[in-house]
Image (cartoon, rainbow, N blue to C red):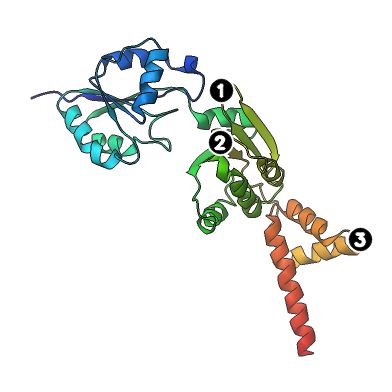
Amino acid sequence: MTATGTLVLAGTPIGEVSDAPPRLAAELRAADVIAAEDTRRLRRLAQSLGVQPGGRIVSYHEVNESARTPDLVEALAGGARVLLVTDAGMPSVSDPGYRLVAACVERDIRVTAVPGPSAVLTALALSGLPVDRFCFEGFLPRKRGERLTRLREAAEERRTLVYFESPHRLEDALRDMAEAFGAERRAAVCRELTKTYEEVRRGGLGELADWAGERVRGEITVVVAGAPERAEEVGPGELVRRVRVREEAGERRKEAIAAVAAEAGLPKREVFDAVVAAKKADQAGQAAG
């Protein structure tokens, strides 16, 4: 019986080529098949590393992933060593790879990895936000309604959140985050990590959304602080009472709502909705009287 081969998932640089893991060069030489998200980029990387790939190079990206997976599995079942690389970072992390790994697991084909650079962990480390517990959310939906739904589902998540985002959608995404999580929620936008124009911008989501309107470019990872712990459960009536106390003391309603939201660990929108609902109820009562 022919022994099955091995699927090797290899991390590739997210920017600086010298960050390539040492084993990557050896795997490029040893692989029978190299499945690359972009074959031209793979050849440039190999050239930068001074490596002549030893095996057949095939494309493996989101468009052909489903169709090409069975062929790669058959090659592995026949004893081939298949190296899977994506454009940057680790395969399967918002990149092609999951389907192939799942198919190999189902066929009891060995899967191993060459650990390497990761935009998720690099951004977390640089963000200045808690990293003891976090969750990776990948890319948000492109349509605003779907994006807001996803964000509102995460509004009470206590762990630090990590998102990938495209530069042309960054401002919209940050504004929706500010609406769902609160404009004061701390976050970091990490841009062009390990590259020449690397930048990490930290601040509240509202502040960062204003900054993002300046046409930010490059590869983007957004890290957002988890929801603050609520010291107490505050009902709508109590929220309205606290806002009114502040207004009577001379604060503008907008500032009063922001302050009460911060005290209660709630998004400003939730406090605002409570105030609006109370106002409508008062008006209805007056009209009925």
Instruction: Give residue 252's quadrant in the image.
Output: bottom right
The C terminus, quarter of image: bottom right
User: Where residue 78 appears, x then y in whole percent?
Assistant: 14, 26
Left or right: 87 as drawn, with respect to 110: right
What numbered label is drawn on residue 194? 1
> Which residue position holds label 3?
249
Label 1 to label 2: alpha-carbon separation: 12 Å
Q: Which is more toward the observer, 253 or 271? A: 253
* Residue denoted by label 2: 221
Name the amino acid type tagged 2: Thr
> Residue 103: horizontal and vertical position, in percent?
25, 38
Query: Looking at the image, which residue is at 10% across and 23% down?
Result: 2
The crowd level at tag 3 (other Cα within 10 Å; few <14, some 14-19, many 20+) is few
Q: Residue at x 62, y 46 (%)?
A: 171
Q: Nearer the viewer, mark 1 or mark 3?
A: 1
Mark whose residue sits in front, 2 or 3: 2
Going from the N terminus, do you reach mark 1 or mark 2 first? 1
**In this picture, is 2 found above or below 276?**
above
| Left or right position of 121 against 3 | right
Q: Nearer the viewer, residue 289 or 228?
A: 289
Q: Residue at x 41, y 22 (%)?
A: 115
Q: What's the amino acid at mark 3?
A: Ala
Q: CA distance from mark 1 to mark 3?
A: 50 Å
